[in-house]
Image: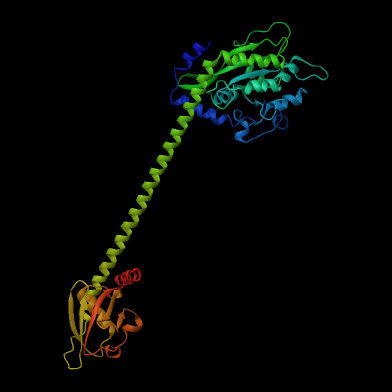
């Protein structure tokens, strides 16, 4: 059986199979809470969650159908906190969940609804399934080097339910025909991943079926599961390999998505920065054009040089070695000095700082100073100024502080 199964599976483990495997990984944590189509209050099992350290090879419980079986058939639940989950819902979903955990699926279908005061074969089988000994066998790892999950997962449906009928229809021809008295179905299936018409699906391959005449006691069922685990070691290895491949594929896919997102964010950021740069260059160009137009007006509006004996002779020395001088009337405004520097030497007046050679006079462009007369700010007949820009002056002060 194991060799033929390996050959079947090796035909199509490509990307679409890996996608299905990923879907099955998600299914492991999304069990159908309405296990068999019965009322919501009945089918909602207790949800038990423990820490990862406590569980080791046991998955978190969700929508445990075993609690419903225990209540309905008056069977004691001795699985303990770490006992295996008994799934409800559809058989297809259970198969996907089992494959996502690299486990075989134990299928149990009771034949009758519970009877008051009468212990049926269904009761005997359920007591064994809910026993601590069977729970221990189900949670045992398939191999020392295997995954963290156990080796068996359980699925059951209520007697006479639509899920039970659908499962029997799907398993028809795969189960051994029962003669005589009707007995519950107890079988172990391998969740076989197959490809048909380009689509991947999980189908049940029956590995073993118990005759249930009578149903196995807990020790017998535990021994049965242990022997099946040993017998089908190759199939477990195949399940674990496929699970790892699905996880690797998921990691690569997430890494690729993150890379694409990072690349898109970078492109978006670069586009925004480029737009800001263009807008800034445009604004600066418009500003420069406005400054050039203003300089033409300033040149035309500069007062003529004063040649009288009362004229104030002003000499300029720039940091780049450039120099200039001009004679102004004592009644000229301080703003005339800045307009002269701006128009002739092309330094924006708003940034100009004029400092006398002796350091006693410092002039900057501001409304209060601009309207003063040259004769009122303490200029002699000959005054020399060092010319600097406000920004350069601030940088010089910072350097002096550091030194």
Quarter of the image where the C terminus is located: bottom left
Q: Is residue 68 visible?
A: yes
Q: Which residue is farthest right?
A: 117
Please say if 93 is above or below 182: below
Q: Quadrant of residue 98?
A: top right
Q: Is residue 112 visible?
A: no
Q: Tell me: 398 left or right of 384.
A: right
Q: Tell me: 244 left or right of 90.
A: left
Q: Tell me: 206 left or right of 327.
A: right
Residue 374 location, x and y as percent?
27, 88
Q: Which residue is farthest front?
A: 403
Please say if 90 is above or below 402: above
User: Which residue is at a point 57% across and 29% down the rendered structure image?
Assistant: 27
Residue 13 location, x and y as percent?
45, 22
Residue 263 location, x and y as percent?
38, 43
Q: How many marks?
A: 0
User: Which residue is at a point 81% across and 17% down the rendered structure image?
Assistant: 118
Question: Which residue is more in the foreground, 82 or 345?
Answer: 82
Q: Which residue is farthest bottom?
A: 309
Residue 241 location, x and y as percent?
49, 23
Q: Which residue is farthest top?
A: 179
Q: Tell me: 130 left or right of 318.
A: right
Please say if 261 is above or below 204: below
């Amino acid at each position: 059986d194991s060799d033929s199964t390996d050959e079947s599976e090796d035909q199509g483990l490509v990307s679409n199979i890996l996608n299905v495997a990923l879907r099955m990984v998600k299914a492991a944590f999304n069990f159908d809470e309405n296990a068999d189509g019965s009322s919501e209050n009945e089918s909602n099992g207790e949800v038990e969650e423990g820490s990862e350290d406590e569980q080791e090879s046991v998955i978190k419980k969700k929508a445990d159908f075993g609690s419903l079986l225990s209540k309905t058939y008056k069977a004691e639940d001795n699985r303990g906190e770490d006992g295996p989950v008994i799934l409800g819902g559809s058989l297809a979903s259970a198969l996907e969940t089992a494959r996502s955990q690299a486990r075989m699926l134990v299928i149990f279908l009771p034949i009758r609804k519970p009877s008051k005061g009468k212990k049926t074969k269904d009761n005997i089988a359920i007591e064994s399934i809910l026993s601590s000994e069977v729970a221990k066998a189900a949670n045992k790892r398939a191999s020392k080097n295997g995954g963290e999950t156990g080796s068996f997962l359980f699925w059951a449906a209520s007697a006479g339910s639509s899920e039970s009928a659908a499962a029997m229809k799907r398993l028809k021809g795969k189960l051994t025909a029962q003669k005589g008295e009707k007995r519950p179905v107890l079988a172990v299936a391998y969740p076989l991943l197959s490809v048909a018409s380009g689509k991947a699906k999980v189908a049940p391959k029956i590995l073993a079926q118990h005759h249930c005449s009578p149903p196995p006691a807990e020790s017998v069922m535990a021994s049965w599961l242990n022997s099946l685990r040993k017998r089908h070691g190759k199939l477990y290895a195949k399940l674990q390999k496929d699970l790892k491949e699905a996880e690797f594929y998921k990691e690569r896919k997430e890494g690729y998505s993150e890379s694409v997102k990072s690349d898109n964010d970078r492109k978006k950021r670069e586009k925004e920065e480029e737009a800001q740069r263009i807008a800034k260059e445009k604004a600066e160009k418009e500003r420069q054009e406005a400054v050039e137009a203003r300089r033409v007006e300033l040149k035309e509006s500069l007062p003529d040089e004063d040649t009288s004996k009362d004229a104030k002779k002003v000499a300029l020395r720039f940091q780049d070695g450039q120099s200039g001088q001009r004679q102004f009337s004592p009644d000229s405004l301080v703003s005339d000095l800045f307009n002269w520097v701006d128009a002739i030497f092309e330094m924006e007046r708003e940034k100009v700082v004029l400092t006398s050679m002796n350091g006693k006079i410092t002039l900057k462009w501001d409304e209060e100073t601009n309207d003063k007369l040259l004769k009122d700010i303490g200029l002699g007949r000959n005054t020399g100024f060092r010319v600097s820009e406000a920004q350069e002056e601030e940088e010089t002060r910072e350097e002096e502080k550091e030194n």
